[in-house]
Image (tube, rainbow, N blue to C red):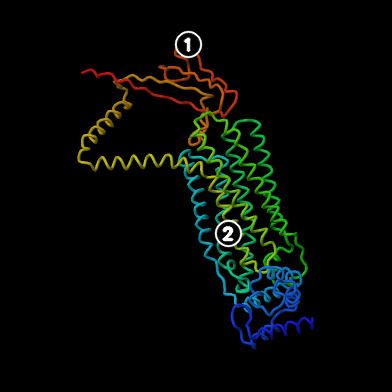
Amino acid sequence: MAYRKALLCVSLAALAGTGLGLTQTPQADLFSYIPRIPQCGLGCIVDQVPKSRCRTLVNATCICTDRNFYADTQACILEACEDTMDAIETAKIEAEACGRPHRDRRWVLWPALAILIVAWIAVFIRLAERWYTFRSYQTDDWIMLVCLVVYTPFAFMGQYAGRKAFGRDVWTVDPVDLTFALKVFFVAQSFYLVCLGLTKISLLFFFLRIFPNQKFRWAVYATMLTTSLMTVVFVFLQIFQCTPIPFNWEGWKGQFGPFQCLDINRLTVACASLNIALDVIILVLPMPLLIGLEMSWRSKAGILFMFSLGLFVIATACVRLQFILLYRRSINPTWEHTDVLIWSGYEVSVSMIVTSLPAVRILLTRALPNLVSSILSRTRLSDPGSTHFATQNSKDTNSRRTLTRRDGNFPLSRRRMRFYSLDQNKDDNESEEGLQLGDRTKGVSHVKISADDTGGDGRSAERGEPLEPMPVEAGIRVQKTTRIDSLRVFPTQQ
């Protein structure tokens, strides 16, 4: 070790005329770095210099810009320095010697925050639309409600930890802030896994509501069971990845005492890879049934596009996995792991948005026509030539009110007709309200129509017999009853 230190002293002395790093540094300052470098870091620097393309410390610009030398030295320091503080101190001195500027990229958290807010609003719209329309929730809606409750602290914690310690070089972060940020990040990881699992399960319950095919349902149940088990197992492993648990946020300092940890890198990669595999399975599951829908290609393309938005979830998960593989072990985690933090938020947010898109689509299809109609009405009323239109509209309204009086003196006769499909129960779901998948599968659809003048009790007008719904052998069965009231007005007696 004494030989290595002497060699480094000679090399630093040779740099006196050229300066170290990116700036010209006085000779006295060069020697001041020697006692500050920890022994483990000093040994790695001396070992790696001859192996680099620079060959010697004389070429300061080469040493400070050689990425391979930096990566090899970093890997050596992580192995040689038992105390993490020694590794961080070595990196800090290297940055100071090379004249590296203080970096801060916490601004990248703002786009992530925008996506987090959009996802929260999308789920809120989904739940509000369901409640406003049906005054009740289905199973997938309840799951998304729980997911929203879990997602809210996850988003807050991720943003807080990111702004507190991430996006900067680790040697510029206050140790107290770093410890607290790692603690918050540790808790947020559990929420991340729970949110991903809940969005997948919610989407699978949605499939169960709109696809009655028995084989498909068994496949959905199997995928749902796998997703649930994986979520529980990975949350458990994430919490107990290190024992004692406080080591997860205090162990970075070194000298923590006895502890045991799983291979966190392998655990993270396995979790990310299996999540991507499940996303692919969930994306592919409904495709054969969707392709078999009996409808125009334009409508079919729209539905396929909506279901294919799961590709965005897979894309964000793959990008996150790429950053995990790139920065498995790092001496500067607060800078390099910022990308993992951001893309974790993107993955959860996009999952929630895609899961809520059917309900958002329904709301838009209802709101936009009403908005256009309102704008047109205001335009007509503001037109001086629209007086006749307003008067006629008022007469029509009064006429309709006259026809719907309940005083028993109806100047009309009412004819009712019923259209029967599978049965007369209504299933309030997106397949009727938005996706309109009912009666769209290939096959023969049996429908009976009868005229009913007896009050509409479901009996035939000719024989008074109840109508039996005809079975549909294959496809998506939509349970619905459609009643059309036709009004025939007779002149009143004077």
Figure quadrant of the N terminus: bottom right
The residue at 62%/82% (across/down) is 19
Which dot marks residue 463?
Answer: 1
Work out how far the residue at label 2 is from the one at label 1, CA to CA, in angstroms.
69 Å
Q: Position of residue 41 (x, y in %)?
A: 73, 76
Write down the quadrant of residue 174 in the picture: bottom right
| Residue type at the position of mark 1 | Arg
Above or below, comparing residue 25 to residue 420 in the picture: below
Would you call the spot at circle 2 few (<14 residues within 10 Å), some (14-19), or many (20 or more)?
Answer: many
Who comes first in sequence, dot 2 or dot 1?
Answer: 2
Figure quadrant of the C terminus: top left
Circles 2 and 1: CB distance less than 8 Å? no
Mark 2 or 1: in front is 2
Write down the quadrant of residue 281 in the picture: top right
Q: Position of residue 150 (x, y in %)?
A: 58, 53
Circle 2 sits on which residue?
342
The residue at 72%/59% (across/down) is 264
Q: Mark 1 falls on what kind of element?
A: loop
Horizontal arrangement in the rendering, residue 143 relative to residue 367 (left or right): right
User: Between 310 and 368, which is closer to the camera in this rendering?
Assistant: 310
